[in-house]
Amino acid sequence: MKTLTITRPDDWHLHVRNGAILKTVMPHTARQFARAVIMPNLKPPVTTVAQALAYRDEILQAIPAGMDFTPLMTLYLTGSTTAVEVKKAAESRHVHAFKLYPAGATTNSDSGVADIHAVYPLLAVMESHDMPLLVHGEVADDACDIFDRERVFIESQLSAIHENFPGLRIVVEHLTTAEAVQFVQSASAKVAATITPQHLLFNRNALLAGGLRPHHYCLPILKREHHRLALVAAATGGNPKFFLGTDSAPHQTSLKENACGCAGCYSAHAALELYAEAFERAGALDRLEGFASFHGADFYRLPRSTGTVTLVKSAWQVPLVYGDDGVAITPLKAGEALAWKML
Ligand code: NCD
Ligand code: ZN
């Protein structure tokens, strides 16, 4: 049987929520990954080091005994974030970055930043403390077509942030367009990016294949095929600026299959299998380890993880739903067969 063994990977963009959902999703991630960057868009958002440490404890309690997993915490940047908090975060061993959500751009982003210039002084503090800024790169503008929002954000805001703060490490999260790939490639070594499994596997047709497909709805939204091809080329090209970030974003099935379904794909149940499928299709399975296990750790200046995981080419069927006790989460590729399976 065909097998693939790689250094235990890390997930550099993950949502795990809190409360009941956390207990359902955490074992999936802890099984596959050594570490994950935990996104702070809870209700209310995680804005202080004290909140991040409390959230970290809650996450650690949801990890099954015997599993070795380290959550890497982030803080949600708001108009009220202070320079003192940025310094505290930089001094904390457990907080690794700030997350910038343009207000209104995605799930739980109401507390996000409405005017990017208002937080420029804080970006200067992050730059001076070498604190990375993780960016949801979309304008939240009704007048801007939803398929153009990433490109317009890069042109109108991100380029200026990079120019004004050349020492600031930036991760452009969940790339979806050829223009974003181009921006990251041509920017300095301070700029890197994560790429999700859904954006490598699907183009925007998957949203409307035979009907409305709410489980393929995430933000930034799936784009045209030529964008998907640019993302596959970036992920499999060996460039250390690109690394794994699932953006696995659990929502109750009832909130996805809804007249106003919420944004986010759940992929933690089979993250590596999904990436393996995309890399194999591109004839680049040998590049999966760099993307999944090395590039992100190097960018975040953390030691590469130790240990290995093994995938086998052995088909299995994804369950229709995960969860119990009132939790029901429909995973990506629910009910479908996956070619790879993690042992
Ligand atoms: C994420 C979520 O549900 O928290 N949703 C999504 O569509 N990706 C938020 C985000 O990363 O934009
Ligand atoms: Zn996300």
Image (cartoon, helix red, strand yellow):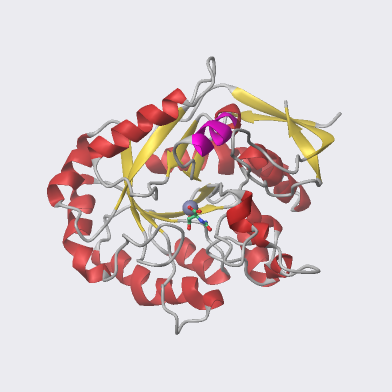
Q: Residue at x 26, y 71 (%)?
A: 115
Q: Which stretch did the figure color magenta?
A: 20-27
Q: Camera-side residue: 54 or 275?
A: 54
Residue at 53% in and 47% down: 245
> Does residue 183 belong to the magenta stretch?
no
- In the image, 60: left or right of 291? left
Residue at screen point 54% across, 51% down: 239
Snapshot quadrant of residue 91: top left
Main SS class of the magenta portion in the image: helix
Q: How many marks?
A: 0
Relative depth, front residue between 309 and 14: 14
Q: Residue furthest bottom?
A: 143
Instruction: Residue 46: give x, y in percent of width and height.
Output: 32, 45
Using the rendered image of the protein, determine whether residue 303 is visible from the camera's viewpoint: no
**Image vertical order of residue 127 relative to residue 229, above or below:** above
Q: Quadrant of the C terminus?
A: top right
Q: Nearer the viewer, residue 112 or 271?
A: 112
Is 277 left, or right, of 155 in this rendering? right
At a point 64% along the width and 41% down the height, the residue shown is 271
Quarter the N terminus occupies: top right
Q: Does the magenta stretch include residue 26?
A: yes
| Residue 128 visible to the viewer | yes
Give the image location of residue 44, x and y in percent.
Answer: 33, 49
